[in-house]
Structure formats: structure tokens, C-alpha cells
Image (spheres, helix red, strand yellow):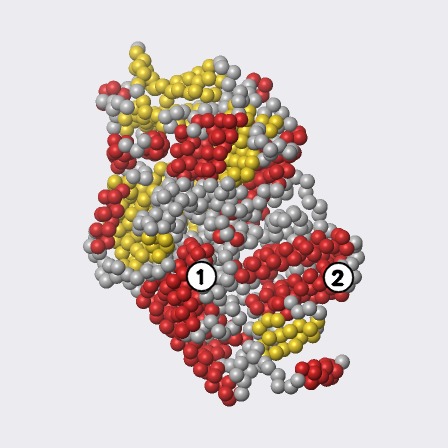
Amino acid sequence: MTASKGQTISLTESTERLRSLGQLTCFAAGREKEHRLPLAAVDIEAKCIDRAAHVSIRQTYQNNLSELMEAVYIFPMAAGACVTRFEMIVGERRVKGLVKERAAARAEYQEALNQGHRASLLEQERDNVFTVQVGNIMPGESVAVEIEYVELLSYFSDGSCSLRLPTVVPPRYVSGEPLSRDSVGVGVSPDTAVVPDASRISPPLLVDGFDARVALSISVSLPVDAPLKSFSCSQHAVSYAFEEGVKVSLSREDEVMDRDFVLNWRQAKDQISSQVNASLLSGKLTGMVTVLPPALPEEENFRSARDVIFLLDRSGSMSGIKMDSAIRACSILLNTLESRDRFAIGAFDNIVEWFRAGRQRKLCFTRADNDGLSQGDQFLREITARGGTELFQALQDASTMMQEHSSGRQPVLVIVTDGQVADESRILKLVQNRLGLGRVFCVGVDTSVNEGLLKRLANLGGGTSVSVSPGESLEHALTAIGREIGAPLVTDISVSLQQNTGAAARVMEIEQAPSRLLDLFEGRPTTFFFGSREVLAEGESAGEYSVSLKGRFADGSSFIQEIPVKLSGEAVIGKLFARHYLSELEDQYRLNNTSTLRERMIKLSVDSQILCRLTAYLAVDKEEVVSGDSLRQIVQPVAAPAAWQGFAGAPAPAASWNSPVQQKGRLSLQAGAGGAYSQIQDSDMDMIFGQVGGPSQPMPASPPPAPKQASLWGAPARSREMAEPPEILPAAACDALAPCDSPAPGDVGSIEVISRLLEELESRLHELQSALPSKSESCRSEIERLARELSEKLAATSFAFELGRLQSLLRGPLNDLRQALSRSVAASRIRPLVQESLTRLTEAKGEIAVWKGEALPDFWSGSI
Amino acid sequence: MKTTDYSLDELAALVKARLSAVGQLDIGDNRVSPVPDARTTRYYTSIGLLDRPLIVGRQARYTERHLLQLVAIKLLQYLSLPLSTIQSRLYGLSEIELAALIEAIETKLQESRQESAGSDGQFGRPVQIWREVVIEPGLKLMVQEDFSTGSPREALLKKIEQALSHLT
């Protein structure tokens, strides 16, 4: 037999001794505290009232150090959140925060810390990314901040509605050369020429297995008078009815903050109609207009031929189940095209790879007939994730493509992505400037999608956006957008406000947000805001108000709607108007950053006490002066988003072992309810050779079927016991340091033993490969033995959780192989199975290397 | 205040020198790659264990603090701790704490080595490390790492053969 490197290994006795030594040493140095992370708890409460969610977030920071601490946390809130309140809570005291100009607020915050006051600062980095700093927390002390925001809910005319509460800011792809200046933030990405504030939106990541122990609670109340239909939630949640409605809360206490909390519901009898709610506060009239598009019979919805470009994000962050879902989404939308439409597909990472039909050399649109569509599907199926996310470049290419090759048809751009890019500003600017792109529609695919970018892109591009969770059933989620692509019902909408005082009616001047009103799409109510320019004096406000809308149907006929205004004293309408008007000004500022515009935004933000990117909320507790010589800043690291594959932090999705779905070259991730982890715990020998599964299934002809909705979310939460670092050795364990003169060869549960088994398995598979068709019987029993031993060892190791993915990697292919061998099928059919097993083995070895910190997760091969 | 700074190569050399000085690199299998490359440092930065480098011109520059952070990571890795544990131990440590931790580990390692050396003398076994060679499924040979035989090759094989014949 030839010697392979798999056959010589060193025994592990010395390693184990070193490990225990490591624990002793580390704990000697920092025994008193579990860890130094500041964030102890996050409590999110949401109330949905009248199509708006009122959300309050309470973050509790705990100082585990022996000196003063400044906690910094980069965290998400809903895209377009209108932040209305910020308070710091020290013991019994509540200190109200005020909105100030951002630089001034920062200076004041620093000054407060220097003077020994506790202070906190809330700044907005992006539509959905914020930074909070809480300084001068005394040792052993807890200080909390409370943030309140209002968000408009997106809903459809059938009464379905959804609420998304993000819990983590995922790593984003940062373009450009690092700048040679101090970075402006505390994050881990350096500022670059393209993204000069990258360091403000890049929190450090927790390595998988390091449990940050943030106690998370989320509860949502829905005041409903009718029963709810089709109720679904992204996480394990419980709901119970109370007098005024329904309350939904997380059912687990150890839910990890690695994904958006998404709640979908539909009210059974819900009258949705166009309406205007307005409030008149100190002479200023502000209003919220909800327009329900008219329902048209199908044949009347005139639709012109389209040229549709699909831009599919294939960057490294899309790896795994996300890529599968994105491909599937793209394929579903592609198949909604009609034969008179044409399409192009560009898969982008650092560059764009365009689909070419047949043997076509030249880049052009392909007719969406059966042949074109099936070739398009074929192209989609072969896409794998890799590299960076140069969405900006891709948009430029798409724009060129559109200008050079599209003619006489309606141009449409569909972007399928997780939106995890940092250069949002230049991307939005591009869409604002390059109208040649046509209408822009976005499909967000992620467990923590960057909705801030996607919604804004769609709004600026005159389209719509939808977010889906990887693994969920996409058909339903994409129905609406599939219908909408390229075909708004009503366009060119204008609005006016009239005041009718009995005899006379007059038109009032208004400011509106957004300034270019959104087009109306079938079945999707649209909301916009207005505010009167004039301030009405005491006696002038009497009378009735009404809003009239004028627009154009696709066939050219005119659309007119007049809606009476319902007046109330609701301050929230004024605040929402301010927030949307600020967004409007931000869009203008992006194109033309004049100081006048800047001053205007700051004034509006400070006057209305609504946060924007040019201001900050500041709270200073002047009651007390804390004592302490030094102040240490600790940045809260965050979990890697769920379902991000190849990422050290991403837990492996649970695999359904009974029905392995084979997919060429890509790991199939058919998730099942039970989950890999719970099965790892029982140490039965059938770990890898599980219950008899069917023979390997042929490759599906269409993209892989989307796993059941519950699957991804049903993935088991990590268990505290298993996620914990290896146990601390008691003092007596010092004996373990004494030399042991006969090393035990079968050191149970050691990582080296597992590595060795993998190596042995590998050499056995190689042997089988070269010996086929003979020897299959002896190899089978040998492989079976090794697999069983591997299972036992995996179950016995104290890192069973971290190594859980090994099981899901190996189980399917090895099982298939064993069955094929026992049925003595032809060698030609066994070979691919052996190859598959070998591929998985290599992956498994990579997993171990990553876990041991020797190698980097795949994710890093192409930055993000 | 001007502090010394290093390029990544210089930093890697310093880390290596520091670890070699305490004799860390010559024991065990080479599970710890002593020289961090650009990708590895970027990864350590992303998990908050290594500060962002300074950017001077278009070059990344590193300081004493970076050196301490890397040496600490490497020492703990050498102790076979998983990265998650390393992160929880090192995250948020000040330079002084890092230096203290490094020193503590180095001292412990030295003590442990002396202990081993002492007891090795007692038992007359200089080495802890064994290698095992799989001859074929079910049959392994165990060899001390620095084993060198005095007997001629044929004699050795004969001995092995004899030993095996007892088994069958």
C-alpha cells in the first residue's frame, strides 16, 4: 500500500494538555467576568395602529469592567423609520434626548463625558443603520436607552400586511481604496474613497460559538376587531388574544439577533379605501394620503411590450440557500414574461456576466419565447456565488445595455440582491440621474435584507420592491411584483389640496413628499404625505378640506379621484410628513449638496425633533458626576446574519437527511423541521448512515424546489450548553499537566481524532475509486465502519455544535454510496457517488480548518 | 506623538520572532500558521481582535498594539482554543491586559515544559509525541516521533513480524 499523508498523524496527548493549560491561563487573567461585551438586553415592542407601526426599542448596557465604560453599538432600525423619541435611563432617572445639529451634538457629548456626566448619543448612518454611544457607565452599573420610531406598514389591497423588525446590521461590501486618514467610525471596515463612512456601518462580528448573551425580547400587538388570516412569523413565536387585539411575542428566550423578525398577517374583513388623514397643529396642516388604485378587469390593463434586464447578485454573501432562492426568484419572474417581451440577464459580482442565447457572440436582448426562457433558466441554474458586490458597476453596465440595445419597448430593470453594499449613495445617485434604466424593481433576498436601499431604489426608479426570506415559498411573495413589473396602472399623478369654506373653495399651496408622486400599481395602495406651506391663523382653518388626484391610465385615459380629508389632532402625521419630507430633501442633497439645503434639513429636523443624517439625538444626565480615571470604549460585536454560508458565524441550515436532494456542484440545502443539531445529540450509530433513504434523486430539471416555509426559520436556535466554550477545568485539573507516559490512541472527542478519521475515510475512498469495480465489498464495510466511528466521535466531542455541519455535509452522499455498494450496481454509477463523497470530505476538512482558525471562511476569499 | 510602525511583512516577522523566542513554534504539529497574511489579518480585524491598520499613503501600517494583539491570538491558537473562545477572551482588552495575558501564558508554558522535562528524566522518556502508521485497516504501528533505530532494517522488520505473529 502506498503511504499517503493521511496515514501518519501525531497523537494528541500534548495538544489536549495545551488546551487545558490555555483555559487555566485565560481564566487566571480574567476570571471575574464572563466577557466584556456591553449589550445585555434588547427589548422591542411594536404596536400597529392604522397602518403604522409604533416601535420602541430598549437597549440595556452593562459595564462588566473595573473602569468606566463607553458602549458603542451599530444597530438597525426599519428602513424609513421616523425616530421620534430618545431617552437615557439611569436607575430611576429618565433623561430626554434632544435633536441637535450632528457636529454640535457630538461635541456636547464629548464635553459631557469629560465633565463626568453620563451621556448618550444616537446618530443615523443610513436609512436603516444607526449608532448609539452610551458613555461613563460606572463599573457594575447598567444604563439603558429607549428609542421610539414610527414606520408605515406596507400592505396590499387584500388586507395582507407585514412588519419587519431588523435585529442586525450585516457585513456590507465596501468598494474603493482605503483613505489615508483616521477613520470616522469604530467599525471594522476602513473608510474608502467610495465609502468615506464605511467604518461607521461595519460592526465587528461574533465568531460562531461565542454567545454574546444578549437577552432579546420582541412583542408586537395588533389591535384587530376581526379574526386574522394567514398569520406567519419568521421566528418561533407565540400569540395570544387580549381585549383589544392580538399580541405576538418570541417564544424562546435565547433567540439570536441574526435575522429580521418578520410578521405577516391578513385581516379577514378589512375595508381598505383611499383616504386622507390630516392633522392641524399650530396652524400647520399635514396629511397622509393613501390611494387605492382602481380595480380593472384584466383585459383593460393595457400592457406594452417590454425589454427587461434582470440583474442577479451572485456575490459571496449570497452563497448557499440565499443564492438558490435568488436564482429561483429570478426564474419565477423571468417566466412571467410574455412572448412579445425581450429579456437580458446579468449575473454580477465584481463583474457582470451576461446571458447569451444560443451561440450568440453579440450582447443583445433575447425574445421571451419558450426557447429563450428555457435557455435563460439554464443560464440561471449554473450560477454560483463568489466575489464582491459591485452593484454600481452592474447598474452602469445595465444602463449602457439598455441604451444601446433597447428600442421601442418599455425598459424595465429587475434587481435581485441582498442589498449588502456600503456605497448606497452613489448607487441611488446613479438611478436618480440615469433614467435610461427604465423602471427599477427590487427583490431583496436575505434573512436581514437591506430594505433601506432597495425601497429607495425602487421609489426613485418608479417601481416597487419586495423582500423575501431565503428558503421561503417564493411564488406567493412574488405574485404582486411579477404582475407589476413594468406595468403601473396609473402614472403622472399630481395632487392638490382644497379648502371649502361653505361658499368659496380655494386651492392651498402644499409641499409633498415624495415630490414626484409614486405611480399606482394594481392591488398595492400607495401612501404619500403633504404639508401646507402657509400657517393658518386662528379663524382661517374652518371648513372642509379635500384632496384631488389626477393621473393617467396606461391607455391614455385620465384618472381622477377626490378624497375628503379626515381631520384629527394626531401629532404622528406631522412627524411622518417631516420624516418623508426629510428623505425627499436627502434625495435632492445627494444630487446637489448646497449649504442652503443643508441648513433647511437641519432646521426641519431640529424643529420637528425627527432624526436625520445631519442631526443627532443627545441625552446628558447632569444629575450626577461619576468618578473614575479611565474610560474604555467597547464596541458591541454582532452575530453574522443567519443563512450566510461559509461564514464563521453562520449556523449550518438543518438538512433533511431522509431525502437528500442532489445538486451538481452545489450543496443542497433542503431544510427540514427537526434539524441537524437535535439529532447530533443522540449518539446513535446511525448518525451518518441514517434511516434508509431513497436512492439518490436525479438532478431536478428546474431550479431546486424551494424548501418549505417553516424550514429556515425552524432551524434550531443554538443551545446555551453547547455554544459555550469548553468547560473550565477545576483546579485539580492541573494534574492534567503532569506528563502521561502512555498516550491513549483513541482520545475520545478530540478534534485530531476526527481529522484523522476524515483522512482515513478519504484514503479509503481513493482506494475504492482506483480499485473499482473490484474490492467494493471490503471497502464498503471499511467505509461503513469509519463513518460510524466518525459519528460517535462527533457526538462525543464537546464541540458537537460547531461541528454539526460536518454531519449534514457527509451524511447524504455517504449514505447513497453505501446503498449503491450494497446493491452492487455498476461501477460507472458508483464513481460519481465516490466523487461526490470526496468533494464533501474536502469541504468537511475545510470546515475543521475554519473552526480551528487555521483557514478563513470561504466568504473571505473575495472580501464580501 | 510618533510611534514606530511596521508593514505587514515586518509585523509578521516580529510576531514570528516573538513566538520563537519562547520556543513555541517547534512543538506539536504545525497547527498554527505563525505568519499572518493580508487576508488573515483582515479577518481578525473583522471580528474585532485586531485593530484596523493605519493607512499611510496607500500602505497599511501596524503598531506595537497590533503586535500584541496578534501574538495573543497566536498563543491562544497554539493552546488549541477555538476561535470563539479566543474572541471572548481577547475582545476589548487593553494593551496592558494583553501584555499581562501573554506573559502569563508564556510563564505557564515554560513551567509546563520544565515539569515535563523533569518527569521525562524520571521516566526516561524524552518525547511526548507519537506517530501512528496505518498499515492496513485494523493494523496500526505506533512510533515515537524522533525514533531512530540502532538495528539494521532487516532486523527491525523481523522484530515486527515476530510481534505480529503472536497476535494471529
User: Residue A352, image x and y in percent?
Assistant: 52, 38
Quarter the N terminus of chain B occupies:
bottom left
Left of A485 or right of it: where is B42?
left
> How far apart in space, not on screen, are marks 1 and 2 (Cα)?
41 Å
The reply to whether label 1 and label 2 mark residues of one chain is: no
Res. A839 image quadrant: bottom right
Instruction: Give how far across and how far down residue A37 sits, in percent.
Output: 38, 58
Q: What residue type is labelled 2?
A: Ala
Mark 2 surroundings: few (<14), some (14-19) or many (≥20) residues within 10 A = few
Which residue is more in the foreground, A485 or A259? Answer: A485
* Chain on which label 1 sits: B
Vertical position of residue A293 compared to residue A457: above or below: above
Residue A388 appearing in the image: yes
Residue at x 50% of width, y 78% of height? A736
Residue B36, numbered circle: 1
The secondary structure type at the circle numbered 1 is: loop
Quadrant location of residue A848?
A: bottom right
Q: In this view, does A461 lie above or below A101?
A: above
Identify the mark at residue A771; answer none if there is no mark: 2
